[in-house]
Amino acid sequence: MRLIAKLLIITACCPLMAMVQVDGNLMRQVVSTDYMHRPLPLDTTHSVEAMMQKARVLRFEALPVSGWKHAGLGQLYTDNSIRLFVPVETGRRATGSADDPDYAIFGTSRISLDMCNRNLTSFNRITLDVLPVCKGEGVMNLNLVIDNTPSSGLGAHLINLRNNRWNHIVYDISGVRRDNVGSLQLYTDIKGRNQFRGDSLLYQVRNLRLEYVDSEQKERGWNVADGMIAYSMSGYLPQSSKTAVLGFAAKRFCLVDAATGKCVYKGKVKVLNTTIGTFRVADFSSFCKEGTYILQCEGRATRPFGISPLAFVDSQWRVLNFIFCQRCGCDVPGIHGVCHTDMYALHDGKRVSYGGGWHDAGDLSQQTLQTADVAFALAEGYNVQRTASPQLAQRMKEESLHGYRFVLQTRFGDGWHGSSLGLLHWTDGCPNTSDDITTVRTQNTSFDNFLYAGYEAYAARVFSDDTCADELRSAALADFDMARCKYEKYGIDKFVHIMEHTYNTPRSLYMAVMSWSASQLYRLTGDMEYANLASQYIEYTLKCQATDGARPELRGYFYRDTTRLSITHFVHQSREQMYAMALLELCRTQPKSSQYQRWLTSVRLYAEYIKSIAPYTAPYGMISSGTYQTEEYRDSDGFARLNIWAPSNAPQLYEQQLRNGVRLDDRHYLRRFPIWFSIFNGNEAILLSTGKSAAVCASLLDDNHLRDIAAGQLYWTVGANPFCQSLIYGEGHRYPSMDSFSSGEIVGEMPVGIRSWGNNDEPYWPATNNACYKEVWLTSAGKWLSLLAEL
């Protein structure tokens, strides 16, 4: 009760916070969960799936209960419904491939219905009711497969389920290949006991139907979904551009004060011809009065949204909730108990537990550097919010230190760390039993240690009043020294672990990270040796910057290395922001250096490049992937590292995708989405990294255009996209179910991101809930908070 009273006093003293809090229940939920030491309650009422249930059914066909066949583990019973019993334990160890032995399950239980190679194109969705029943708590889900020949390539549709209740499931199949369906299948993977107290799980299925409805979900293209308004559902920052894109014809719009119902701004709908098409846009950028508003146009209206510097505070609470729910090594109520404390990294006769930090994504994998990235992002958020929003800041600090503790825990003290583990299953948590894991990857790379050192140095400063500050400081000094010694002896590392997201790190970025880390140590210690190293390390990066292109799209970016065979790109994880962050730190910490103007010129070049590629996605804010040059595959090592598991015809596909971009000259094209070939696709981390770069440059150059570009990445993410969907579950509305197969649906979860269609350069966001695009990812959450820390 004292917490609630304290919150009410703070809200009363800060009427602006109350005014822009679009979701009035959020803070009550935060308090009721003891400031998110339990997961925030899930609200599905405004989800995409809930909206789909309102469609009018024009025709349907009930599928039979009888005739289903079972394969794998478990038992199938059919009477008035389908009942599938799945064992919790199998009595054997989960075993995967030789190079990833613990990325494994205990088995699968699958049922299938023979569809006799039927053409189902006269139906556009499947519905069913599912009752999952378990003793205890835990995550239960099913996968639905349309087994067509040829396949759509999308794979299974993950169905997240809420336990011990009937779940009505709607799956839009309008974009799925279904002209020659051999079977329909439902299956679930067996991942271990976790918090299940019984010996089996029950999945009861009834009312399975093929349906044809009067509306389908938009899945591809730049045009706005018919009849909808694409806008930032979280709201807009007062001084930024504020636009909405219309999916219908209109001439005028009105901005209505949500409190009074009065129209406070009227405008004409603009028709814009851009490089991606013709669009109708409501532009109210000149209206900056803080408050809560509704955009009305031709009888249609948005939900209320704020115009305020605090417009994205709600999203930060929700994303923080997702990060908390991804915790490893401790209890997360309703999701898992204390987990994976019986996983170990082994090195030089020593053993350290690898339970801690956060699970990486929809699976249970872990990467130490990825946990460090997010711990740093949370520390950035704390540093910004500790005055503006003390409760949020304190909770960010607590969560950040959870991540930093894991980073410190995995150190062996000689430069080696436990670095990563692919994981799909739960262990018993008891040491020295048969399911202990001792295959955690270990490595000693100077790149990782430079980043650890920089992150630790930053945390030691911003958490200087905490008992952990001395330990963080000591670790930062030691990790930097070990990284420096290894670099000076062996040069730039050859990354060996293909499954780690550092595998594709370009040399130019490598050196930028080294410089940034040295600057952080300089800030921490005041020792000029670190300042000199920061200045020295950035030299290689500057040699990799394009400086003499005939137009701004052809200069300012960074090549992978000094051969200039390929430009720096990312297809999944991205640390592009480190170029700008390294240069910013040099300019801020060494303003009297003889090299200052060179650094500033580099920032300006890079900033102009970012500004030059922004218009290619207008009227949306999503930043383009950037400039590519022909035959980048001639950089065979860089190409292979960037595009792991690429097909044998990747060079031909590269050229095809390249030419589906925008031709800049004989050798260069601009791509809005990356060129990519494998399962690793989805651009959320990429656009948020570039957005961070824009914001960092803006802070040094005091450039509002760059701030606008940075804010555009936020707006795109929470609804100002062609699909009119928020990519943060629970934020705004029309947020889709995501691929969170180990931890279930979570408030604040974020996906890998929107992908592109085939070899074309247009957005593609399938309704099918599968990896990699819809898989939840800790990295996206961290980059969201890191970008907001700049704005």
Image (cartoon, rainbow, N blue to C red):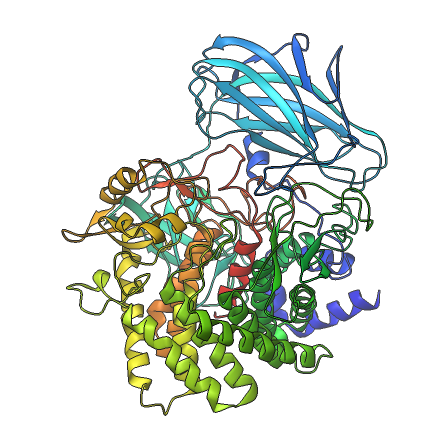
Judged left or right of residue 277, residue 713 is right
324 relative to 194, above or below: below
Judged left or right of residue 510, residue 473 is right
Residue 732 locus on image (x, y percent): 55, 50
Q: Quadrant of the N terminus?
A: bottom right
How many numbered dots are placed on residues in this image? 0
Judged left or right of residue 43, residue 487 is left
181 relative to 107, above or below: above
Locate residue 459: give its quadrant.
Answer: bottom right
Residue 443 locus on image (x, y percent): 57, 60
72 relative to 734, above or below: above
Instruction: Answer yes or no: is residue 599 visible.
Output: yes
Judged left or right of residue 615, residue 13 is right
Instruction: Answer yes or no: is residue 308 visible.
Output: no
Residue 231 locus on image (x, y percent): 44, 51
Residue 680 locus on image (x, y percent): 46, 44
363 relative to 55, above or below: below
Judging depth in this view, the residue of 244 and 127 nearest the camera is 127
Judging depth in this view, the residue of 496 and 329 nearest the camera is 496
Judging depth in this view, the residue of 298 and 588 nearest the camera is 588
Locate residue 96: give its quadrant.
Answer: top right
Judging depth in this view, the residue of 133 and 627 nearest the camera is 627
Q: Residue at x 30, y 62 (%)?
A: 559
